[in-house]
Amino acid sequence: MANIDLSGYNLSELKGLQHDVEKEIKNRQHQDLQKAREQILAIAQEAGVSVEELLAANSKKSKSSKGQKVQARYQNPGDNSQTWTGRGRQPKWIAEGLASGKSMDDFRI
């Protein structure tokens, strides 16, 4: 890359250059994105698959592997609204129950 001597420019000229550079960067990013879209569409057409099908297949994988809720396995006998899946940190009511001599089976749902 060529070194450009910017020491001869005043502040407003430098800001103008900065604005022009940022504008050109955005234009190039837009052009690159457009090229990528065109390439994806061409590949999908060659394969006989629509882009919607590609996106739908990808979203199903991510949904099935992340963020699934796990059913609660343990319940507070004193307050049925308090439950725990058995994952993560033990709730206080479990720790207190274990300390008082109860077993995990006493809390099972």
Image (tube, rainbow, N blue to C red):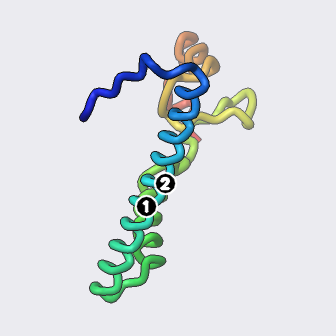
Give the amino acid type for the residue marked by disc 1 in the picture: Gln
Q: Which mark identifies residue 27? A: 2
Q: Is residue 79 left or right of residue 69?
A: right
In what element is the residue under mark 2? Answer: helix
58 or 109, which lies in front? 58
Count of numbered marks: 2
Residue 108 location (% of width, % of height): 55, 37
Using the image, tell me which numbered label, if any, was put on residue 98.
Answer: none
Please name whichever residue, 62 or 99, is drawn nearer the observer in this view of the structure. 62
Q: Out of 18 and 69, give the one closest to the viewer.
A: 18
What residue do we see at 47% from left, 48% from top?
24
Q: Quadrant of the C terminus?
A: top right
10 Å crowding of disc 2: few (<14), some (14-19), many (20+): few
Report the residue that reaches farthest toward the left.
Answer: 1
Residue marked by disc 1: 31
**Left or right: 60, with 96 as reference point:** left
Residue at (41, 65) in percent of width and height: 58
Label 1 crowding class (10 Å Cα cut-off): few <14, some 14-19, many 20+? few
Tell me if label 1 and label 2 are in contact, CB under 8 Å: yes
